């Protein structure tokens, strides 16, 4: 029995290594803000959301599978939360009643496992009831399969049968073992046997009597009682193991159910908060990794929105068939925000979530990398450009074809000519290796160099600035300019000249 | 000739096969450490008395060398070891039989012992048959084992055992435990309850699961409860158990005496080879020495101290092999040179090599020839003995007197730094006197001394010197080479190091 709510045919692998650049992604894309919003103070949901989002999925089919499940969740939030409560109750029951298999003796293991199983039986009943009542409200393949499985595997008859066995495993009729003679005539190969049914007992009375020998041990023969206990243990050992392992399996099933649903609960939490702010969400349309698509309307930076707790400005861009997007323009004009919204939307799309946009379509990428300027290295191990190049080298160690790299003012720790040349060489190489590049830069020489090549697969965006310095925080298509209008900002800070707002 | 012993070709009555105490020179030569290490994992065979008995006839040495060489074949060696392993089990089972009170268990274990013994003999015969044996000893053993295995009595024994085992393994019974009552009856096809429970929960399987199977302690399971159960089983299957009982009465002693003795004696070879194998793995060499009692020419190429080598390997320090030879009239090594340079090691090695050769064992080295001595006498410096009223010098002299009294021209004497507790003049005088007597005896001797004059006393003496690296005299090479005893060269090199030579001093004073 598997929940299979994140993959059609496999469990979510909690041990799966996150991408090597996990930390950079979280830092550069402000992902923590997103995770916290999804978690709503639940540490478990936080961890799962983080894991699922960062372990990006590159399979279109899986992405669509999750999108459908998420759509069902958005339609039936209360039913989903009821199911989510079941594994949580399991954990609580377990803690409250000290349930578990702790013993050092087979008899103890058996009784621990029996009590544990009894508790699970109640929860499995509940799961079956939910399935019977609500299954028809769900349309996604994932949920329909899940409910069908619950109804099939956890039928009333089956659960009653389990209950029956739990009774029999008390062995009130005695323990029946078969054995053979091993070395030195020692009993060996002890196997616990199912006692004949009561009905057959009566039949036995009327069949010819077969020889049976018996003896009693003295009530005060402690050594004898111990010896009998040990023999029984040998027979029970196996069945205790089987039952204890079964409780483990059910426990794992419920835990995996919790893990997989935690992701969707996180999505519900996020959608509720965005709805309150009046922000829109939509399900993105992913296309294959080897295509080049990036077009969207109303794409906003969800991290910024969550931080400002208000509706933010969205962008509309059509960068289909482009490998290179160079963003130049005014300081504080929304370039970084735009770059971040690109990165977050990519991650959300590739984990099966909705995206913060009116519409969004893009090719999926094999890996998402960010290369941002960092604070001066305080360990004095290396100079700043040195440090930047080292990080770039780490990226190159891991990058593959059809990846995306987001550069934010990279290689500007040196003079513009040198920085531009480094950037040019790196960018050229990446493009030739079929890697999509988004590059925010002030380096005119670098940006203009590519612009003047008149490449079909490049697009140039510019942070908009109205005459007089007012920012719109919108990006428009436009050629790189030689100034980034830093003077405006300088004036604002040093001369208190307000930047005129639109 | 029929097989008698794997250690002795001939079995005369006056032959000393085992010596209970270690010879007196053992400690001085570190042979005690070597033999302890060789026998440590084989205590139950009590092998030391064999290692304490040196041989005095060359034929027996060759007899053993041939067997040892055969056993260097890894396959044969392993086969003999697996036979030995079976015999260990046989003894363990028989030990159990003696201790047990419950008849049906006792007889069960007796049957196991007999079965293991017969299997051991059969596979030994088979393995020997396939092995490429050259030694006389193992060839006659093979004949013996073949004959024994195909004897009617052995065949009958084996047949009975197999019949009983087959019958016992067909026994299948049920035990029912309820409260204080235990019932025993034959098995009637009841289903495996564990499998049923496993099937019931099959659908929940989620990959690998934690193992809750306990490692139950089965040691004390021949208790009175199991014995009573077994008694009930015996009643369920009366014929089988009656046959078992008859077997035990009829075959009270099934062990063949010659095989029993072989099992112990062959361990002498296995133990020695096992000990040397770790040294061989470290790249050291062993060889089978030629041993003569006619002339006293001896030599070794790349010999080493076996006790020291073991220590070096465990401490990962290099082992320095040494060569020596004595020919024509040469009899005595006079060893001098810097301390800690390997002089004592050289003396010990000389003794060890001769002793090991006299056991019929391969010795550390590439190529060797030794003299078959009648005894080895050693005198190494000892700590002062308070209980002894004599002074140390007197002690030394008393001991040396005893040695010279007992030694014959066929003996070996090893002297290590004696007379250190007297004045140089006395020491020179005494040493020369002693040396004269040794020269007269015409025996083989290693004499470690700080007195250079001894080295050139006679044509029988050969001077060997421990050496240092010329450019850093503080470092020893641990090589002992033939060289005139020349304390001066060493002193000069040290002086050079401290820039105190003539030319250095002239230079330093001038500047």
Image: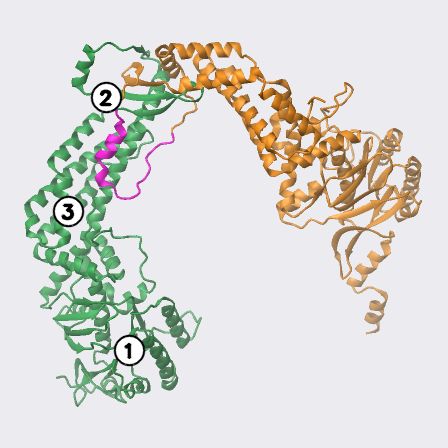
| Element marked by disc 3 | helix
Query: Mark 1 = which residue?
Result: A439
Residues at circles 1 and 2 in contact by the CB criterion of under 8 Å: no
Instruction: Identify the magenta region.
Output: B190-215
Question: Residue A268: image x %, image y %?
Answer: 13, 58
Could you confirm whether marks 1 and 3 are on the same chain? Answer: yes
Q: In this view of the protein, which residue sits in the foreground, B391 or A263?
A: A263
Chain shaded green: A
Chain B tint as drawn: orange
Determine the chain carrying the residue at label 3: A
Query: Mark 3 = which residue?
Result: A85
Q: Quadrant of residue B79?
A: top right
Q: Quadrant of residue B474?
A: bottom right
3 or 2: tag closer to the N-terminus: 3
Specify whether A108 is left or right of B103. left
Question: Residue A191: image x %, image y %?
Answer: 31, 25
Determine the chain carrying the residue at label 2: A
Cα distance in 3D space between marks 1 and 3: 45 Å
Query: Mark 2 = which residue?
Result: A195
Q: Is residue A325 above or below residue A134?
A: below
Mark 1 neighbour density, 10 Å: few (under 14) some (14–19) many (20 or more): many
Q: Is residue A215 magenta?
A: no
| Element marked by disc 1 | strand
């Amino acid at each position: 029995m598997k929940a299979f709510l994140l993959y059609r045919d496999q469990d979510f692998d909690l041990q799966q290594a996150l991408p090597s650049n996990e930390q950079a992604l979280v830092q550069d894309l402000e992902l923590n803000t997103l995770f916290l919003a999804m978690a709503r103070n639940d540490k478990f949901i936080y961890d799962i959301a983080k894991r699922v989002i960062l372990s990006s999925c590159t399979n279109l089919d899986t992405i669509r599978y999750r999108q459908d499940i998420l759509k069902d969740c958005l339609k039936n939030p209360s039913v989903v939360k009821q199911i989510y409560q079941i594994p949580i109750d399991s954990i609580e029951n377990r803690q409250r009643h000290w349930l578990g298999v702790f013993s050092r003796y087979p008899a103890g293991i058996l009784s621990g496992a029996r009590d544990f199983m009894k508790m699970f039986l109640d929860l499995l009943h509940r799961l079956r009831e939910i399935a019977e009542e609500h299954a028809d409200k769900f349309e996604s393949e994932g949920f329909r399969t899940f409910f069908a499985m619950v109804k099939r595997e956890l039928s009333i008859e089956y659960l009653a049968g389990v209950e029956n066995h739990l009774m029999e495993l008390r062995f009130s009729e005695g323990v029946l073992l078969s054995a053979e003679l091993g070395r030195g005539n020692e009993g060996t190969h002890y196997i616990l046997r199912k006692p004949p049914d009561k009905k057959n007992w009566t039949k036995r009375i009327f069949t010819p009597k077969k020889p049976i020998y018996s003896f009693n041990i003295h009530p005060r023969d402690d050594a004898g009682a111990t010896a009998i206990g040990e023999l029984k243990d040998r027979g029970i050992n196996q069945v205790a193991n089987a039952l204890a392992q079964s409780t483990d399996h059910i426990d794992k099933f419920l835990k995996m159910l919790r893990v997989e649903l935690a992701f969707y609960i996180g999505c519900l939490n996020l959608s509720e908060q965005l709805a309150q702010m009046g922000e829109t969400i939509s399900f993105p349309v992913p296309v294959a990794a080897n295509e080049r698509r990036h077009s969207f309307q109303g794409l906003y930076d969800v991290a910024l929105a969550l931080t400002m707790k208000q509706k933010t400005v969205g962008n509309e861009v059509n960068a289909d068939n482009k490998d290179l997007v160079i963003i130049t323009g005014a300081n504080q004009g929304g370039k970084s925000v735009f770059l971040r919204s690109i990165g977050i939307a990519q991650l959300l799309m590739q984990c099966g979530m909705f995206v913060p946009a009116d519409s969004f379509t893009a090719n999926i990428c094999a890996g998402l990398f960010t290369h941002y300027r960092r604070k001066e290295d305080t360990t004095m191990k290396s100079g700043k450009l040195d440090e930047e190049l080292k990080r770039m080298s780490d990226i190159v160690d891991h990058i593959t074809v059809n990846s995306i790299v987001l550069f934010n003012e990279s290689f500007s720790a040196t003079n513009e000519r040198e920085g531009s040349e480094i950037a040019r060489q790196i960018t050229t190489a990446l493009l030739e290796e079929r890697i999509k590049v988004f590059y925010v830069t002030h380096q005119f020489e670098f940006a203009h160099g590519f612009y003047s090549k008149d490449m079909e697969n490049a697009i140039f965006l510019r942070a908009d600035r109205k005459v007089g310095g007012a920012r719109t925080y919108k990006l428009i298509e436009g050629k790189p300019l030689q100034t980034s209008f830093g003077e405006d900002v300088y004036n604002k800070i040093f001369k208190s000249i307000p930047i005129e707002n639109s | 000739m029929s097989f008698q012993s794997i250690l002795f070709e001939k079995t005369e009555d006056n032959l000393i096969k085992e010596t209970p105490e270690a010879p007196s020179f053992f400690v001085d030569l570190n042979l005690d450490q070597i033999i302890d290490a060789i026998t440590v994992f084989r205590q139950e065979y009590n092998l030391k008395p064999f290692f304490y008995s040196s041989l005095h006839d060359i034929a027996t040495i060759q007899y053993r060398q041939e067997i040892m060489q055969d056993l260097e074949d890894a396959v044969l060696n392993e086969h003999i070891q697996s036979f030995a392993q079976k015999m260990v089990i046989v003894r363990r089972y028989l030990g159990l039989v003696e201790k047990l009170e419950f008849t049906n268990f006792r007889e069960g274990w007796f049957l196991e012992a007999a079965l293991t013994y017969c299997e051991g003999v059969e596979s030994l015969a088979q393995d020997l048959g396939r092995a490429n044996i050259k030694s006389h000893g193992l060839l006659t053993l093979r004949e013996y084992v073949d004959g024994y295995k195909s004897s009617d009595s052995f065949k009958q024994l084996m047949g009975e055992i197999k019949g009983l085992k087959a019958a016992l393994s067909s026994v299948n019974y049920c035990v029912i435990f309820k409260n204080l009552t235990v019932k025993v009856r034959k098995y009637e096809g009841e289903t495996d309850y564990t499998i049923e429970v496993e099937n019931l929960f099959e659908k929940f399987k989620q990959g690998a699961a934690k193992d809750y199977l306990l490692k139950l302690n089965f040691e004390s399971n021949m208790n009175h409860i199991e014995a009573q159960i077994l008694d009930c089983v015996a009643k369920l299957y009366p014929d089988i158990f009656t046959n078992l009982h008859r077997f035990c009465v009829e075959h009270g002693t099934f062990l063949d005496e010659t095989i029993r003795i072989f099992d112990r004696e062959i361990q002498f070879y296995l133990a020695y080879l096992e000990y040397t194998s770790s040294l061989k793995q470290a790249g050291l060499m062993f060889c089978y020495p030629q041993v003569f009692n006619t002339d006293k020419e001896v030599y070794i190429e790349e010999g080493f101290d076996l006790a020291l080598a073991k220590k070096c390997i465990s401490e990962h320090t290099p082992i320095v092999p040494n060569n020596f030879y004595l020919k024509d009239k040469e009899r005595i090594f006079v060893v001098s040179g810097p301390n800690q340079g390997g002089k004592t090691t050289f003396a010990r090695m000389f003794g060890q090599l001769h002793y090991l050769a006299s056991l019929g064992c391969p010795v550390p080295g590439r190529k060797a020839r030794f003299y078959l001595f009648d005894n080895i006498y050693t005198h190494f410096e000892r700590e002062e003995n308070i209980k002894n009223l004599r002074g140390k010098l007197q002690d030394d002299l008393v001991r040396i007197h005893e040695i010279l009294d007992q030694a014959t021209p066929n003996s070996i004497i090893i002297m290590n730094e004696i007379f250190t507790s007297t004045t140089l003049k006395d020491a020179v005088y005494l040493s020369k006197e002693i040396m004269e007597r040794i020269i007269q005896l015409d025996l083989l001797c290693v004499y470690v001394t700080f007195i250079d004059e001894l080295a050139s006393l006679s044509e029988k003496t050969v001077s060997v010197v421990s050496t240092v690296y010329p450019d850093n005299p503080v470092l020893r090479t641990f090589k002992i080479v033939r060289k005139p005893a020349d304390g001066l060269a060493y002193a000069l090199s040290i002086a050079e190091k401290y820039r105190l030579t003539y030319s250095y001093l002239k230079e330093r004073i001038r500047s």
